[in-house]
Image (cartoon, coloured by chain):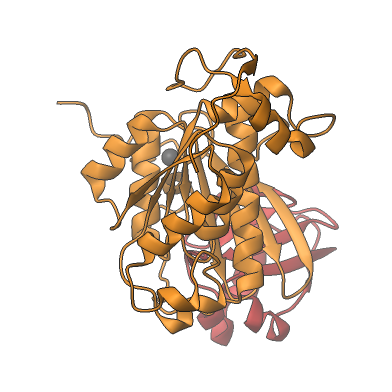
Chain colours: A orange, B red
Amino acid sequence: MAPSTDAPTVKPGRSRGCHSRSSMNLSSRELERYGRQIGPGVLSEAAQLRLKESTALVTRVGGMGGPAALMLTMSGIGRLIVAHGGELISPDLNRQVLGTEEDLGRPRIEGFARRLRAANRFVEIEAIDHEPDDAEAAALARRCNVLLSCPPGFEERMRLNRAAVEAGIPLVDAAQWGMTGTLIAVRPGETACLACIYPETPPFEESFPVIGAISSAIGSLAALEAIKIISLTGQPLWGKMLIFDGYGGAVNTIELSRRKSCPVCGDGRRAEP
Amino acid sequence: MKVRVVYSGRSYPEAASLPGELELPPGATLAAALSMLCGGTRSRYLSSACLVAVSGKHVGSLADCQDRELHENDEILLIAPVAGG
Ligand SMILES: [Zn+2]
């Protein structure tokens, strides 16, 4: 469906988004679409406009990144960049909500992007059919207002953390195992980054247990953090880790400590050449 | 004095075999508590990368954390890192 061309009704508010597109506004059709999320306790019209002016990167878009990408798309973010390599396989479908039976055996990102585009005609979806390396992650981060880290291992998480810190943009890290999950929001230079928390890359198995209900829950919470951060709404989890123990039915939040010698955001950084 | 111990993250399936409470002498330190928790056969359940928090404040990992005096009713939270996507 073609983008709406109806008359603008809301002027842009002040955007702290570092890469905002100028002279934007919300059309009456967009205001109708987002009517249930604009109001007391949710978003102001200016906050909704800030979402529209923003770009987010979600990588990858599987168990957690899929629901995160879907919620960001449905919320009305302006541009969403999604990255995920490989082909969809049957075991993915216990949690990868953007996948379908019809897409089995096909490149994941094609079906995922199609599903996201079908969810909201007002959002631009940019699809990348592989996991970005260091250079690409850094370049993507410079185009974004927020980065959502949802890959299945620590190496990629650390790469996305470095890219976000270098670009000076917030990182939301969502992670999961079994029926438990964690969520961290990093404000570079001000709160602990992933390298502050994990001085050594922790061991982690490639084939981890997961049930879709927990990955979707954590992915949706990651989207909520990103929405709050880019729309300047509510209180993001800056410098905290939320730990959701779905098995035991408990939620904990801890205050994270920065590490002075952190090689990514602290004194341990290599000097610029 | 008593302190509570909570296990989360990657290690929760093993938590049932680990103590949920420690009885410590007054003035006991976090290092002493962690030594009790992670000694012997228990160490296989708790990797050195486990994050350690005391009463809501992150103090490092089992491999390297800031020692401190514990107080009655403190809660030690051990979070085995997770990274699944
Ligand atoms: Zn750091």
Q: Quadrant of ligand 1?
A: top left
Which residue sits at x=22%, y=42%? A135
Which residue sits at x=61%, y=76%? A211
Q: Is residue A264 visible?
A: no
Image coords of residue A62 (percent x, y): 47, 64
Asked if residue B48 is positioned above or below residue A229 in the image, the reply reads below
Q: Is residue A161 visible?
A: yes
Image coords of residue B10 (percent x, y): 56, 72
Asked if residue A254 is positioned above or below residue B13 in the image, the reply reads above
Residue A255: quarter of image: top right
Asked if residue A11 is positioned above or below residue A81 in the image, the reply reads above
Image coords of residue A22 (percent x, y): 46, 14
Image coords of residue A133 (percent x, y): 24, 51
Q: Nearer the viewer, residue B34 or B78?
A: B78
Residue B79: quarter of image: bottom right
Judge from the rendering whether residue A228 lies leftward or rightward of residue A269; answer left or right.
Answer: right
Q: Nearer the viewer, residue A96 or A166?
A: A96
Q: In which quadrant is the C terminus of chain A drawn?
A: top left
Q: Nearer the viewer, residue A102 or A244?
A: A102
Judge from the rendering whether residue B42 lies leftward or rightward of residue B6; answer left or right.
Answer: left
Which residue sits at x=70%, y=67%? A245
